[in-house]
Image (cartoon, helix red, strand yellow):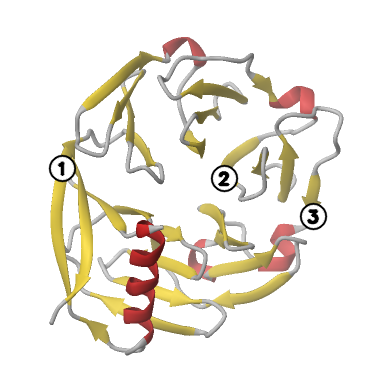
Amino acid sequence: MKLFITCLIVLFSFGSSFGQEQEWQWLLKDSTRISESSEWSVDILQNLYISEAGVINKYDSTGTLKFTQSIKSLGELSDMVIINTMKLLYFSEEQQILCYLDNTLAQNQDCIDLMERNITYASHVARSDRSNKLWLYDEINYRLLLIDLESESTAPFVIENLRNITGSYSFLGMEESGGKLYINCGLEGIFVFDIYGSLLQKIDRSYIVSMSADPNGIYLLDNSGSLEYYLVDRDESSKISLPNRKVEQLKVAGSIVYLKSGDFVYKYSLEKSK
């Protein structure tokens, strides 16, 4: 409840003066070293997961290393999807497999072979807010699939002809939140779909290198180091000054913002300046 109230306060502050650059105070909470090629993710309890050199490390909300697990036998990691605080999904594009890890990073189920699900070639995955569902992008056929992780016999929901819908060959990533699926199509912008696969709108933003959605909108980081928060239903946005202009990636978990810059992931709380 405390975290929910904090999120509402932050969102209310955003809404009070959209369309102009906001003065925010970034309060540094922690920093964790990370290599250039590492994959990383965070969960709602502020646990930080970093994968590098065939090993996943899990740090708790205080920055303490809690668990370490070798994952070399599973193939090269392409992405980590946080299903919930007790379950992490490991995706290897190289092996075309999905593997479950528990909250201690131990593998606790057989891996899912995507070829057995008749998926030609998945290049991106993303968590769905719907229980036991996962989005995959089939790069060969330019389509999106929402698969049931628990039932192999359940036919996936499919958005066909994504290239024709967006007019783009680029697919840089996707994220679902608040009943909306955001797709980053590079120069063509960000496309917003509802949970039934209907295109809701296009956000005309190019060169977005990282995005992170919450139930109300989406944070967009472009290649110039500019951060914007966009409220989809209101079609309004606010610029936010960053503490470091060389930010490469961001992820948002409630009122906490994680920024990757150089060899570190920085953990911040964000408060409006008085």
Q: What's the amino acid at mark 3?
A: Glu
Query: In the rendering, at what x and y percent does residue 205 appear?
Result: 45, 74
User: Looking at the image, is mark 2 or mark 3 nearer the viewer?
Assistant: 2
Give yes or no for contact between labels 3 and 1 (Cβ–Cβ under 8 Å).
Answer: no
Regarding residue 5, the answer to whether it shows in the image is yes
The residue pinned by badge 2 equals 126
Mark drawn on residue 31: 1
Regarding residue 207, the answer to whether it shows in the image is no
Give yes or no for contact between labels 1 and 2 (Cβ–Cβ under 8 Å).
Answer: no
Q: Residue at x 23, y 65 (%)?
A: 270
Question: Which is nearer the N-term, disc 1 or disc 2?
Answer: 1
Extreme residue in the front direction: 1
* 116 vs 212: above or below: above
Query: In the rendering, at what x and y percent does residue 183 appear?
Result: 57, 60
Q: What's the amino acid at mark 1?
A: Ser
Horizontally, residue 181 falls left or right of residue 40, namely right
Q: Distance between the residues labelled 3 and 1?
A: 41 Å
User: Looking at the image, is mark 1 or mark 2 nearer the viewer?
Assistant: 1
Q: Which residue is drawn at 57% across and 80% down?
A: 233
The residue pinned by badge 3 equals 160
* 13 vs 31: above or below: below
Query: In the rendering, at what x and y percent does residue 175 appear?
Result: 54, 54
Question: Which is nearer the N-term, disc 3 or disc 1?
Answer: 1
Q: Which residue is drawn at 75% across and 68% down?
A: 198
Choose top left, top right, bottom left or bottom right for residue 181: bottom right
Horizontally, residue 227 falls left or right of residue 32, namely right
Horizontally, residue 8 falls left or right of residue 150, namely left
| Mark 1 burial class by Cα count in 10 Å: few <14, some 14-19, many 20+ | some
Q: How far apart are marks 1 and 2 (CA)?
A: 25 Å
- Give the position of the N terminus as an image quadrant: bottom left
**Label 1: which secondary element:** strand
**Label 3: which secondary element:** loop
